[in-house]
Image (cartoon, rainbow, N blue to C red):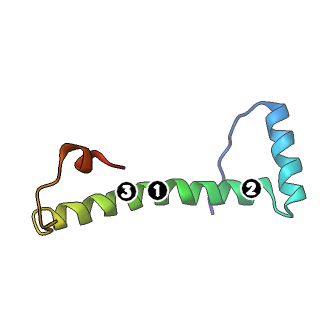
Amino acid sequence: MKNITLSADENLIEAARRRAVSERTTLNEQFRLWLKNYVRREQQAAEAMRVMRELQGKLRVGRKLTRDEMNER
């Protein structure tokens, strides 16, 4: 495992440490989880785009969608 150095406001670091202690974990472990999720989000987005490109032109709705229907979220 590689070590890194981060800089942040002292009060923020202390508040984060207190929270980690209350959750029976460490600031180090919480950062590792954050870093893992940070990378995973990018990978998930890339995978979703790959699937959308693969399905493009292969799915049929059965009728032409209205502009509003196409823009629904």
- Residue 64, image x and y in percent? 11, 56
Proximity of marks 3 and 2: CB atoms separated by less than 8 Å: no
On the image, numbered disc 1 is attached to which residue?
41
Q: Earlier in the sequence, mark 3 or mark 2?
A: 2
From mark 3 to mark 2, how far is it between C-alphas? Answer: 26 Å
Secondary structure of the residue carrying numbered label 1: helix
- Residue 5, image x and y in percent? 68, 43
Residue depicted at x 33% and y 58%: 46
Local packing at callout 3 (Cα closer than 10 Å; few below 14, some 14-19, many 20+) is few
Residue depicted at x 86% and y 64%: 24
From mark 1 to mark 2, how far is it between C-alphas? Answer: 20 Å
On the image, numbered disc 2 is attached to which residue?
28
On the image, numbered disc 3 is attached to which residue?
45
For badge 3, the amino acid type reads Ala
Q: Earlier in the sequence, mark 1 or mark 2?
A: 2
* 73 to the left or right of 23: left
- Looking at the figure, which quarter contains the N terminus? bottom right
Say above or below: 10 vs 41.
above
Secondary structure of the residue carrying numbered label 2: helix
For badge 2, the amino acid type reads Asn
Local packing at callout 2 (Cα closer than 10 Å; few below 14, some 14-19, many 20+) is few
For badge 1, the amino acid type reads Arg
